[in-house]
Every structure is written in structure tokens, then in C-alpha cells.
Image: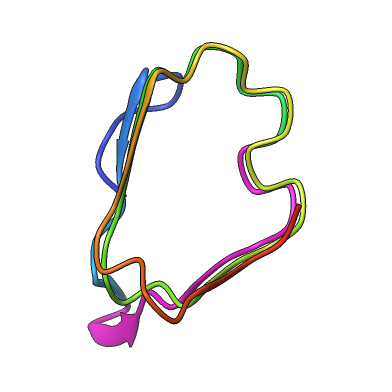
Amino acid sequence: MVGQDNSPNVYLHKEVKINGKAYRMSYIAPKAFHNKTYLRSVYIPESVDSIGSMAFHSCHNISSINIVAFANKHFSY
């Protein structure tokens, strides 16, 4: 994820590296960004297959969400 804490712009990458091992970004957890009122824009890559329930709940200031390759995805409300 690009952006410092409290950054208004979030760019999720296709994969993340932890201790040198690459992991595919395929899921956004429930309430992952819950109540982050400072968020203004979010980029979600094609690798994300699922967005958990209330992942962006109460993010009232988001004005732009870019979801790449939206077809065949599952998003909870």
C-alpha cells in the first residue's frame, strides 16, 4: 500500500513483500479502512477478488475509487 498513515490517497499494489517473500493482494479485509474519514481516493488493482463487509464504511469523504477489472468480483455491503 502506498501512502503514509492518514494519507488521503491509497494505492493498493498487486502484491506486497514481507520479509522478502511476495504475497498477492487478493482481498481487502472487513472494516480494513472503516471510519478513515481522511480518505479521498482509493486504487484497487485487478488482483483483488473480494472486498470484505464494511471495508470502507463511514469513509464519507471518498470521492474517487478506481477498481481495475471489475468483472467477476465479489463485494459485500
- Residue drawn at x 40%, y 18% is 63
* Location of residue 12 with respect to 28 vertically, above or below: above
In the rendering, at what x and y percent does residue 2 appear? 25, 42
* 22 sits left or right of 54 in the view: left
Write down the quadrant of residue 41 in the picture.
Answer: top left
Q: Residue at x 24, y 60 (%)?
A: 68
* Region in magenta: 18-33
Q: Quadrant of residue 19?
A: bottom left
Place of residue 14 in the rendered image (x, y in percent of width and height, measured from the top left)? 24, 71
Q: Is residue 59 magenta?
A: no
Residue farthest front in this picture? 71
Q: Position of residue 9 (x, y in %)?
A: 31, 26
Q: How is the image coloured?
A: rainbow
Location of residue 14 with respect to 53 vertically, above or below: below
Instruction: Give above or below for 23 relative to 30.
Output: below
Residue positioned 64% across, 48% down in the render: 32
Where residue 30 sits, quadrant-wise, is bottom right
Does 21 appear in magenta?
A: yes
Q: Is residue 44 left or right of residue 29?
A: left
Q: Position of residue 39 (x, y in %)?
A: 46, 20
